[in-house]
Image: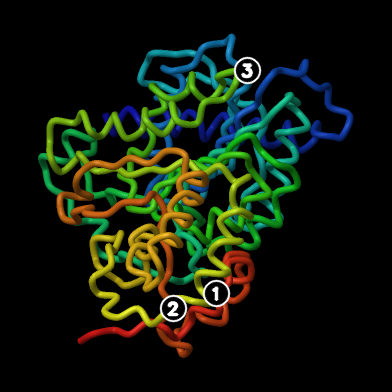
Amino acid sequence: MLKQVHCNKVIIFLMTVVLFFFYSCKKNDNITLSNTTKRTVIIYMAANNNLDFFAYQNINAMERGWDSTMGNLIVYIAGTSNDNPAYPVVYKIQHDTTSQINSTIQWVYPPQNSCSASVFSTVIHDIEKRFPADSYGLILWSHGTGWYPPGTKIASSSGFVLDTNAVRQKMGIVRPYPIFKSFGVDDTSEMDIIDLKNALNQKFKFIIFDACYMGSIEVACELKNKAEYIISSPTEVLSYGFPYQIITPYLFSQPFNPVKVADGYVSFYQNQTSPVLQSASVSVVNTSQFDNLAAVTRKIFSLADTLHNINSLQQLDVSNSGLLYDFGDLCKHLNISDSMKNVLRQKLNNLIIYKNSTNQILNKLTLNSFSGLSSYVLYKKDSIYYEYYKKLDWYKESGYNNFLGKFVVTP
């Protein structure tokens, strides 16, 4: 299988070189626009990293799940060629059931840093202009670490914890690859979540993170004005990611049903026969409810008493890094009245309209409590993330600053 993938990539690389020179001469602002469709879905794959192999697998799955009546499914992929950056390519997905990628190449970019906010913004604008639609969806696919700033390593070695012959054979892998992924790495460059927000110039019907750890209260709040719904995972995502052969039709449903997409993702992994592959979590956030939640948290965080022993809180990464706690479990442990907890629970349920997970993540982390979103627990002001965290919308709007310093870590 890998030989065939590399053969396909060689063909694609040669085609992209030719098309790059053609496109460099011909691309201009007077390009003829396609007829407006109901929805264009953009999948942005920053795959110039060790996930390149899975990017092409996913494109192949998109082709299998595609129906020409849906709309426009447009993929930007910046991958690798013989371990070197390849020319970034824009595909228009078309139906195909072979192991090759047969979708049409629309244009090719020169080599560029796909995790640069300016490059990201330009690519999205180019696709929107070429494929206008009544509504747009966006899927973000790459490496990263939730809201944390570039350079943060939440799980540096556990990516290879599932690198066994049995697992690799089930995933169709014949050489070592990391088994999970998250958003925003191109070679050594990463994209800051605030820069990502500022690079988006419109509000999408949905944003999906096919990525690790992006299901956090901080990320969702940061992007609340950029999408009606945010679908993401607060835990690791296996490298195969979302099963596009299953969820592609749901991306174009009218009206859009985000629960179908999220449920299709988790169900795919729940139905795996190997326990180690039964690993997935997801939530759907209705961003219109953030102001209502923040109004409650501002009051609660100002009144809540000291929270003892944060070690009892549900963590959401297998390495127990202390960087990702379940937000709902945090709320349960607040020293506030039951009536206030009920109001908070109601507002959280209005925000998170769907959540689901397998019983365990990577056959290691048991989810005894799962609300669908993670949260950072700032328990000391000298945290290396504190100054950055103060820049986030969630910190500013939720009243979280009033809660700072009320956490006590029990040895």
2 or 1: tag closer to the N-terminus? 2
Element class at badge 3: loop
Q: Which residue is mark 1?
A: 389
**Whether residue 173 is situated above or below residue 331 in the rendered picture:** above
Is residue 143 rendered to the left or right of residue 89?
left
Q: Residue at x 40, y 55 (%)?
A: 213
**Whether residue 12 is situated above or below residue 391 in the rendered picture:** above
Front residue of 27 and 376: 376
Q: Which residue is mark 3?
A: 71
Mark 2–mark 1 CB contact (< 8 Å): yes
Element class at badge 1: helix
Residue 70 seen: yes
Q: Residue 378's mark?
A: 2
Give the spatial CA distance, label 1 vs label 3.
Answer: 39 Å
Front residue of 147 and 20: 147
* Amino acid identity at mark 2: Leu
